[in-house]
Image (cartoon, rainbow, N blue to C red):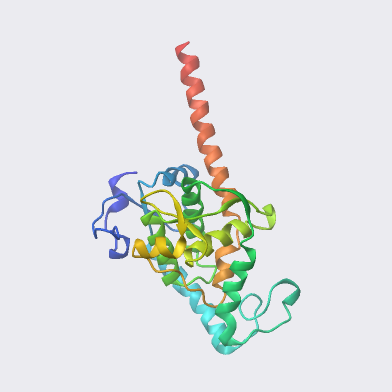
Amino acid sequence: FSQDTIKNAPKSCLNHHSGTMSKPILYLDGYSLTPKELYNLQSGNVDIALTPDAEERIKAGREVVDRIVESKEVVYGINTGFGLFSNVTVSSDKLGELQVNLIRSHSSGVGEPLSPQRTRMLLALRINVLAKGHSGISFENCLKMIKAFNAGCMPMIPCKGTVGASGDLAPLSHLALGLMGEGKMFDPETGALSDAAEVLKKNNLDPIILGAKEGLAMINGTQLIAALGSEAVSRSFNVARCADIATALS
């Protein structure tokens, strides 16, 4: 990454431990992230931040959700149940609980934990999607996700459980669960798995608090498949280049 990535960085993008810019910053706008850039993020040597346009889109998207809640208009995923319960209207005082329960119920993955490096790619890619402003996530929760990324606090995500084209619901739910301060999380100091709430507190991070639609915003996507696909593409380019060099020297 060039030094251009850290010019005019807003205060919210500063390293949260020291208050200084100790790493280059890659700005996410929801549209221009490349597979190579995403693959490079797994090293933990680059921080991320949102572009000003992305910040405004996220805020505007959240305002739409807030207006719907205030008007009491019935909209699927905001103040209704899911699937077979789509015809069930949920009262305003239960909307946050609805989203929390959605995350907990879908955190059903199995198998070995995804590596912290691949989890870092998954988290960055999910933030990049939220930067489009179409999901209704709050700006505050998006900032908490960015701070967790920059601090190296990666939730434990079982490697099996995605349903493919219908979405990486289980992996993304485990991602959200850890950021909520539940489940397990990799301690960036020791690399060991610990209670997510303890890791967040140790690193002076606040858990995300889900409001209306925000659970759905966290898990409606295929970012695990896309992240692993980006890694495969990047590594295949490296393999092809090494093969070309080996052939040229033989």
Q: Residue furthest bottom?
A: 71
Is 16 or 61 nearer to us in this picture? 16
Compared across the picture, whether 87 is left or right of 243 comes to: right
What residue lies at 50% left-to-right and 44% top-to-bottom? 35
Compared across the picture, whether 82 is left or right of 100 comes to: right
Residue 30, percent across and down? 48, 58
Is 68 or 162 nearer to us in this picture? 162
Q: Is residue 141 above or below residue 231?
A: below
Is 219 or 76 nearer to us in this picture? 219
In this view of the protein, can residue 54 be seen by the observer? no
Compared across the picture, whether 158 is left or right of 54 comes to: right
Q: How many marks?
A: 0
What residue lies at 48% left-to-right and 24% top-to-bottom? 242
Residue 209, percent across and down? 47, 73
Q: Residue furthest top?
A: 250
Residue 39, percent across and down? 47, 43
What residue lies at 66% left-to-right and 76% top-to-bottom? 76
Q: Is residue 7 above or below residue 62?
A: above
What residue lies at 66% left-to-right and 80% top-to-bottom? 80
Residue 148, percent across and down? 40, 60
**Which image quadrant: the N terminus?**
top left
Q: Is residue 204 above or below residue 209?
A: above
In this view of the protein, can residue 208 be seen by the observer? yes
Compared across the picture, whether 109 is left or right of 59 comes to: right
